[in-house]
Image (spheres, grey):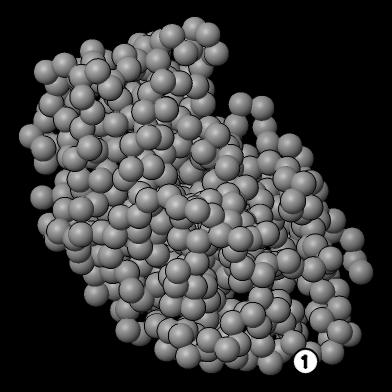
Amino acid sequence: MGGPGGLSRSGMSRRGFLSAAAFGAAGAATLGTGAPSAGARTRLRSQAPTNGLPSPDSITVTDPAFLDAVQAASLLQSGALHPRELLDACLTRSNEFDGEIGGWIRIYPEMAYEAADAAAQRLSQQSVSTNGPAPLVCGLPLALKDLFAVSGLPLTASSRVLEGNIAAGDSTVWRRLKDAGMVLLGHAHTDEFAIGVATEQVGNPWNTEYSPGGSSGGSAAVLAARFVPLATGTDTGGSLRLPASACGITSIKPTFGRCSVRGVIPLTWTRDHAGPMGRSVADAALMLGFMAGADPEDPSTAAGPAVPDGGYPLSAKGGPTPLSGKRFGVVRSDVDALPDATRTLFDEYLDLVRRLGGTTVDVKLPRLPSDITTGDSAEMGSYHNQFKDRLGLYRLGHAGSAALSIAALAVPAIDYMTAARNRLIYQHEYNRMLADHDLDAILVPGAKADGSKRSEVAGISVFSGVMGNVGWANYTGAPVISTPAGRSAATGMPFGVQVGGRPWDESTLIEIVLELQAARPDLLEAPTVAPAPRDIPRVQVTTPGAGPDPTNTANVGFGFHFLPTTSTAAI
């Protein structure tokens, strides 16, 4: 029903959707609604893929909606697939299957088809001959978490508090992706204002009684359900990693400051990370190369090294022991606390690491300072203070969190500054742990529980830490990849592993996970989703909000900006 084999749901064979793009629309079948006329299509070029993309001839997927991002990029770049056909497939699948999942809050078909046509022009032989190759993400559909501003479109943080709010400008991340030719399909639901870990209004595609995790649960759900190949998320307390683990997809929480958060509705300014989500690490790495970079409007982005020339690695090197010489720290206390079924999955993943040549050693993460959350509440309150007359509009459970954060504005300045210093000490201790054990990465369970019912986790804050050991990466700013490790024999739900490393060293982590995923591609399986039609709200671009902030809310932050460090010195 929702699987990738045989014919697509439109009845089109692989040959059908490939030849339709390569030779124009005259007489070609199309997928879904919004099919272009024969004169509307632009003939695409045909050439071999570059930069680690798979060969078009190696791709056997029959429904374009089931193409991974790197597969779709290869077909788009080679001329074997037209951006409109890919968009058709994603829209058709969303409309036919999102009824029980509810991952989308809004979609933008009119804007998306305009962007797909513009992408087709950039991918055409004529444009390539004149302007050079199009960016590798050109023509790929995208879901934005409902925190990322898009000028003239609604931005609501999945909350009644911002009902009717229209973004005043583009977030930096969206501007970068738009300039690279990506196609915005819609905004995906978030747990309200990214406060919680449930995204309770969204069902997990593997079993809709279960939570997709939060707060980027909508983004994870539309990826897992094969509604879209790429999505953005944010991570303040595991909000990229917990949904990735819950939905069986991959996320990269980059180093703090690697991706700008300008124009993103904040939770706490010094812990918020923007990052990519995909079905594989290659997918997420592909988009990270276009999301990342310095932004004068976000000073933290100027602290680290430049994005590697040509982007991040996209393919595994392979061989029998590609992880030979790599050392991995295993946070044993977290592993020992896992339920039996997910403990088995984690142990099997360690066996995979060792089979590929890696060495594992048990380690302890440094203890988080007791006052570490002091700044979190105050920072959250400094943003939500503007909505103190609308507390009754928050979701049940989050109104109290918002009220407590506003009350935290009374915290003495010295307490905030002391917590900031203790955080710096913690960063140094984390780096020293890596250095003392000569580690390339650490391995941490992606979640504490073996799946969570939606009703069980509603209203739980990302600051609580009850869903997984995730705060270490937000307080250090270190990069982490969440990668699938299989499905529980007890619940049938996905479970992931966090692979963490040193600040600014995303490339090493990506290289490691590429090898792990290449060795176990079965771990990247898609759920079988039952048909459940939904009339998803469709919105057109309108007059932008007054601003001045792109979010059209009071989002000024403050002068202090957290910067990750690689220092191991005692303080």
Residue at left offset 17%, top offset 35%? 31
Q: Farthest right residue?
A: 571
Q: Is residue 429 visible?
A: no
| Residue matched to label 1 | 410
Q: Is residue 213 visible?
A: yes
Residue at left offset 73%, top offset 37%? 306
Q: Residues within 10 Å of mark 1 (few under 14, many from 20)?
A: few
Q: Nearer the viewer, residue 511 or 223?
A: 223
In this image, 470 relative to 295: left or right? left
In this image, 38 relative to 497: left or right? left
Q: Nearer the viewer, residue 484 or 251?
A: 251
On screen, residue 2 above or below 333: above
Residue 484 in the image, given as x and y percentages of width and height:
40, 54
**SS label for mark 1:** helix
Residue 569 in the image, given as x and y percentages of width and height:
89, 61
Residue 368 in the image, given as x and y percentages of width and height:
71, 77
Residue at left offset 42%, top offset 44%? 184
In this image, 320 relative to 488: left or right? right
Identified by mark 1, the residue type is: Ala
On screen, residue 81 above or below 520: above
Residue at left offset 7%, top offset 34%? 11
The quadrant in which residue 4 appears is top left
Task: Assign the C terminus to one quadrant of the image.
Answer: bottom right
Residue 194 in the image, given as x and y percentages of width and height:
52, 71
Count of numbered marks: 1
Q: Nearer the viewer, residue 53 or 125?
A: 125
In this image, 292 relative to 177: left or right? right
